[in-house]
Image: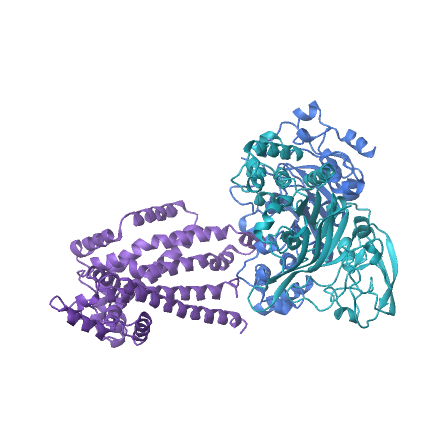
Chain colours: A purple, B cyan, C blue
Amino acid sequence: MRFFGWRARFIARRLGLLLVQVWGIVTTVFILIQLLPGDPTYLLAGGLATPQMRVALASHLGLNSPIYVRYFKYMSNVLHGDLGTSFFTSKPVLEEVSRRFTATFELITVAFVLIIAIGVPLGIWSAVSKKGLFRQLVTNYGMVAGALPDFWWALMLILVFFVILAVAPAPIGRIDIIPGPPQTITGLYSLDAILTGNVSAFESAVGHLILPVMTLVFINTAGVIKVTRTQMLEVMDSGFVRYAQACGMPLSRIYRDALRNALLPVITYAGLLYGFLASAAVLVETVFSWGGLGQFAVSSVVNSDYLAVAGCVMFIAIFALTVYVFMDILQTLIDPRTSR
Amino acid sequence: MASVLEVERLVKRFPAPGGGRSWIQAVSDVSFELKKGETLGLVGESGSGKTTVGRCLLRLVDPTSGRILFQGGDIARMSARRFRPLRAKIQMVFQEPHESLDPRMTIADAIGEPLRLMNHMSRAQQIKRIVEAARVVYLQDKELAKYPHELSGGQVQRAGIARAMATEPEVIVLDEPTSLLDASVRADITELLVDLQRKTDVTYLFISHDLTTVEHISHRVAVMYLGKVVEIGSTKQIFETPRHPYSRSLLSSVLIPDPTREHTPAPLVGEIPSPINLPTGCSLHKRCPIAIDACSGVTPQLVDVGNRHFVSCIRVAPLPSQIVQSRQLVAWKGPRGFARVEEDSAIGLSGQIDVLSSPTSQSKDGDLG
Amino acid sequence: MVQAVDGVSLALASGETLGLLGESGSGKSTVAWSVLGLVPPPGRIDGGVIRLLGSDLISLPEEGLRRIRGKELGLIVQNARAHLNPLVTIGAQIVNAYSSHNHRARSDAHEVAVDTLRRVAIPDPERRMKAYPHELSGGMAQRVMIGMAIVNSPRVILADEPTMGLDVTIQAQVLDLLADQVRTLGASTLLITRDLGIVAKYCDRVAVLYAGQVVEMAPVPEFFSAPRHPYSIALLDSATWQYVGRRQRPLKGMPPDPVALPPGCRYHPRCPFANALCQGTRPELEEVTPNHFVRCFRHEEVARWHLS
């Protein structure tokens, strides 16, 4: 139980901090909404409304109440899951945003897992291996992957695998019209298909995932490889590795222990990457008609659908913060030096 | 000899890491005085608080309580604005030569920096002062244009000394100025400091754990342990006849480069305790070879044992309101190879314990009634 | 190509402690790591022989070397906390050091580790096994390192400034502990230091290193009473002047840049005895009295001067 003593307290404190941060996000969103210019009654009531109708609408909506009343109302709405109604789609914002969010979440999570599973071992290997050829390949790959924009890579992959080779499905979204999405449990098509035993939906969902995931993986793995490699090299050069060698420890054993040291900063990097992907996947989402969160946020901005925009902002921010909390906790479990 | 700076009952506490209500008592009730043209050596190990004392004098750290009398005022509580003009008069030389000089400034710029910030001198006057300062520390002109990384540790430390001397201060606090230097360079720098003092009558507070250098350069020495001064006296008194058990242990640990001398250290048991949870009574009692039960209850005070040699230990220097109780024979072999056999006038305890004399008051008060 | 260490020959008799004395830039740390074959690239061992109990270490393949490191050869370095893995408990690290050379059950190795902590006077050893390096004081970390070096009862211990940066009373504790363990093991020790006080108390013989070369090597009492190299005299002078009251021959200048070594004797630019011969020709290490070696053309005059 010694392992958990102060760590448990740290985790509890960190989660508490998360709640405070989330509250801060929601409040900030509220302030931003208030700062938006223009009178929402114009949009809501329509072009034919008379001024009296708009005034009535305003008082009906509570737009004339003092700010703390509006704030309180807003907060209680949010806590009840009511984020307002989208002007554009006329559906509740929470419903629209969470649907898009699960689409993005499925995409970036699969991509993230692959990025780490491929990038970290490659990074370690390129640091440890003596062959120069491999290192050269990795370096060149890094340069190439970073130089060309992601939507270009996406289009190239579509060209090669869909148009030319005809092995990938059309980039029309997350799933084919037939068989259609499986019964909704989590909102993640591939997972729901497994859970409901829907084989055809599963095949379709996975098929559609392949190209966009490949694009994201291809672009972002280079960074992970580089960071892992750098950290590994640094650790291999450190005092304690040299001393372990002086004690006659076998090299494989030393490196195995040193992995923990090397991967500590990689965890931070990975966390930032994952949080960032939530919004950064927007171009890939657009090319593949994914119906993801970034895509929706952009179109909401274009349509001045400010409640939807607020909803997107909230989701993305809370997602990122949650990821950071996980990374902090993970770090604390590994590193005994984090302050108590 | 005039007193240039007086420290009275200096206290500095830091909040302990990890929050909570614990404090690190870095400095507890320290008093001493600096006389013009003299050096007070401040010795002690990790956690003794000697570095913190130096920092308090320069207000790099704000004292928790106590007074520091300098240039007619109490600088411990002075506002930053009022203290600013006084900074020219009290300067510091640091331990790590390459870290205390800005690596992006040439030596000349580094030496002249305090002049730019403090005095209102013309550019020409500043340059003249820089060159003078450099000459006084035996830095050659060509070295003035170089950067710290191009020079050796010894040369950079000379630059640090020149920088401290540039404003013609009354007091220089030196915090381990020679610890990281090789022996030959250490000797050079020490000689230089002695030389400078002779020429300019500047006063030094020499903080160090290098006892041999301290012995050479200091007129008076104060020994600190866990934030308190446990013994203070002339250099001769401290090094030849140390009375406090800690001082004796410390001095006996010094290794003399002479294989014919037998080295018999008188170590204390255990390690230095954490400054957060200080033992009650005398901070040394758990490790002390002559501790008795009373030591854990009574906090010792500095008492004059003759000729302004003060010791803070109820066994060695009993307070006046204490009575003789038991006797014990103590034999010590000092660092010079002298054997001393003493009969400790051991004590018991009773009633009030008055603070008899502090090192800053006139010694005629040192009457052990 | 810079020669950090040039032609250093040292011989350690069984059970003796040889002090290697040198200031910054003398190349003394390189010697320790070289013996272990762990000079960091791009440095490498360019020649010479390192013989341990008969076999030449330089010609040994990597696996052979690994078996000797930590078993026959123990290493102790300064600043122990920087040389221990901060994410692993000290107990686990000692166990690792032990089980790299002994294939025994986990519980056995654990017992050995606890016992090692006891041998190096760490209080409450069972509990301390789970401590992390950053939780230890400097002195304690140094003792843990001593433990790691002696756990496999080595024949030779290399100690590179093991008490650098420690408080003076802790220094005494650590060195006494090391001397004690060395005596118990009957091991030979190479004690690298720049402190003449340490040499005086703990070493049987001493070798002085300057600019990558051994310039004098002698038994300790003879070194202190009758040194024969000008650099040795300068070192002794710097260390003892506070007792004598004045400096006899202050040492000016800096050690030479290894990239641009002076011709002839490497010490001659700073040497008060240097003459034309010293400037042009390289002196060799010669045995001038039994077991006393000097690398200096003018050692006779130097000895005479010192005695006066």
Q: Quadrant of residue A317?
A: bottom left
Q: Is residue A164 left or right of residue B86?
A: left
Q: Is residue A329 something that shows in the picture?
A: yes
Nearer to me, B19 or A282 = B19
Q: Position of residue C296 (x, y in %)?
A: 72, 31
Q: Going by the picture, which residue comes out furthest to the left?
A: A48
Nearer to me, C179 or B262 = B262
Nearer to me, B155 or A225 = B155
Residue shown at 71% from the left, 24% from the top: C275
Q: Is residue A312 left or right of residue B188?
A: left
Q: Position of residue C272 (x, y in %)?
A: 72, 29
Q: Is residue C203 something that shows in the picture?
A: no
Q: Quadrant of residue C175?
A: bottom right
Q: Is residue A129 left or right of residue B205?
A: left
Residue shown at 73% from the left, 33% from the top: C230
Residue shown at 49% from the left, 69% from the top: A10
Compared with residue B83, is residue A294 higher up or lower down, i.e. above or below? below
Compared with residue B162, is residue A38 higher up or lower down, i.e. above or below? below
Compared with residue A91, is residue C72 higher up or lower down, i.e. above or below? above
Compared with residue A298, is residue B57 higher up or lower down, i.e. above or below? above
Total count of labels: 0
Q: Is residue C264 left or right of residue A142?
A: right
Q: Position of residue A176 (x, y in %)?
A: 17, 67
Q: Going by the picture, which residue comes out furthest to the top?
A: C276
Q: Position of residue B51 (x, y in %)?
A: 65, 53
